[in-house]
Amino acid sequence: MKKILTIITLVAAGLLITGCENFLDRPSLTTMNDQTYWTSENNLRLFANGFYGNYFVGYNSTWGVSYASLRGYYFADDFTSSGKQINFESAAPENRVSYAEIGDGSASGWLVDYAGPTWNFSWVRKSNLFLERIDAMKGVYITDEAYNHWSAVARFFRGYEYSRLVSTFGNVPYYDKVLLDTDFDLMYKDRDDRTLVMDKVYDDFTYALDNMRLSDGNVQYLNRYIAAAFISRLMLFEGTWQKYQLNNEEKAKKYLDLAASAADLVMKSNLYSFTSNFRALFGSENLSGNKEVIMYRTYDAAIGVTHHVASYSNTTESQGPAPNLWLAKSFICNDGQPYKLSTVANADQLDIKNMVATRDSRFEATFWDAPKKESATLLYADKFIDRVGPTYYPGPYPAIYGSNTNTNDAPVIRLAEVVLNWIEAKAELATMGGPAVAQADIDASINAIRSRPLDAVATAKGVIKTTAMTLASLPDDPDRDPDVPALIWEIRRERRMEFVFEPSRLLDIKRWKKINYMNGATNPDLLLGLWINFQTEYTEWLVPSKVGKLKVKKADGTIVTYNGTNAADMIGYYIPENVSNRDAFTDRVYLAPVGRLQMATYADKGFTLTQTFGW
């Protein structure tokens, strides 16, 4: 059953019977008989597998990008394009709805600028239907233990979907049962308060943690530890949102407590450990033996399940948006200090070569070690491929490294995220009267990550492990936001280094109320690449076609443009070609508007759907 996360398209997904008009799905009943299907635990497992493609996307499939590492998470303050930066939404759309249940992270259910779903409640309905059918089987076809487990599975997926909807839209209508076509008052009810909804999610998640099996026969079937890992992510989001966005300390504590306890469950299981080098987490053809990976998705060309993420890390395929100076500066030096405080030689030299030599080992494992024209910023992320793939540059590439035929496994959730969720939740709780973070907590989280083994490629380059963090000598970064305590700042830094092009920097800065980081007018590092000496590092761009286009920014802010004769002066921070800031935006972009058509549909039926605040 290793291939459970090849993401099967199940006929069981067609069992969603009589549904609600408009935003609730009405799937076909032609594939299976609802009256005879719900008679065995095996059929429950098959039906549950229909959720996997929606929530455990990994690298998506073929050319799919929704919820996929690298290709689905490029809209954030870490990444910069040539030309004008991608704008936030500027007006409510005409339509923002998906009626159908679409698995595998299909684009019709994905909003890249909100890192979440469209206005689609079909997956909520699927969970509710699942729960109702499980209830009907209790004591007839399944034992009490099986009933508790499968109810926990269904409630976990319902909580997961509502967590994503709330993170995208804020207030949303809450449903805990399957609606009939005649339930107009419920079908067209206005939004419920987000805190009411998330309290229901909290109840679903606590039920899941109390009742889901520790193992369901295969490590890749959903179990209590996998559920707990995701719960730590989703509850951390809501807890910090309640703190920073809503100033609701009571709810912040409630959700953060659950985030910490869920993570603690995973950590104390002793099933997972930091025994893998960083690069092997993303480029491996087989993650089955990797002790850091809690859940992964398998790809296999023999059965037609492939992706294209590795090809966009092969150093030939273009990257834009690409990593920027703002991101690179955040990487800590290998002495455990931010570069302005570091005593490492050349720590303040912000060119790629020196940064590979002086930074945390994740810098070398994430980025190519020389400027690449294929990147909009010349800094190329080659994180999602093994060490062999880029050696085929400039091609041709074997199928596993090119096009949409890649087969390296995708980590869906891993231990590093769990321990960083855990330490952040504990640090946030400490600011609200909870126990202080202890050195043992840092050792079990940040320092455990830093102690990962290095692979031979990194070692050959002279890369070393980063010094352990100690609370007694915690860095006080001169670039730290004054409203963020030093410990929380360093925890956020650790997340940033760990999760480049993964889910999701955008969600992090939204929950911290830091969307202003994405404004190039106040954050000029957003619009720059790293320091480069074109005459010694990249002479191939000192050509007539780059006259008037190639630019660098000196340390004093002076901009130098290549004129064909000033090659010796082309030293500075690279300015991506024709780069400019995105249009002005306001705090309303923290949440997505609903479509005007959805509001009109409500009005046509005599009901009111309230627009998202600010829109």
Image: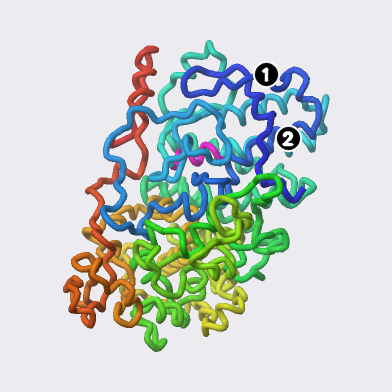
Look at the magenta stretch and give its main secondary structure.
Answer: helix
Residue 470 visible in the shown view: yes
CB under 8 Å between discs 1 and 2: no
The residue singled out by tag 2 in the image is: 46
Q: Position of residue 69 (x, y in %)?
A: 51, 54
Mark 1 is on which residue type?
A: Thr
Q: CA distance from mark 1 to mark 2?
A: 17 Å
- Which of the 4 image quadrants contains residue 402? bottom right
- Does the magenta run of residues contain 166? yes
Q: Residues within 10 Å of mark 2 (few under 14, many from 20)?
A: some
Tag 2 or tag 1, which sits nearer the N-term?
1
**Three-letter amino acid code at disc 2?**
Leu
Expressed as whole percent of the image width and height from the top left, the position of residue 574 reads: 28, 70
What is the magenta range? 160-167
Q: Is residue 475 above or below residue 117?
A: below
Residue at mark 1: 30
Residue closer to the observer: 1 or 598: 1
- Residue 132 in the image: state x and y as whole percent: 67, 25
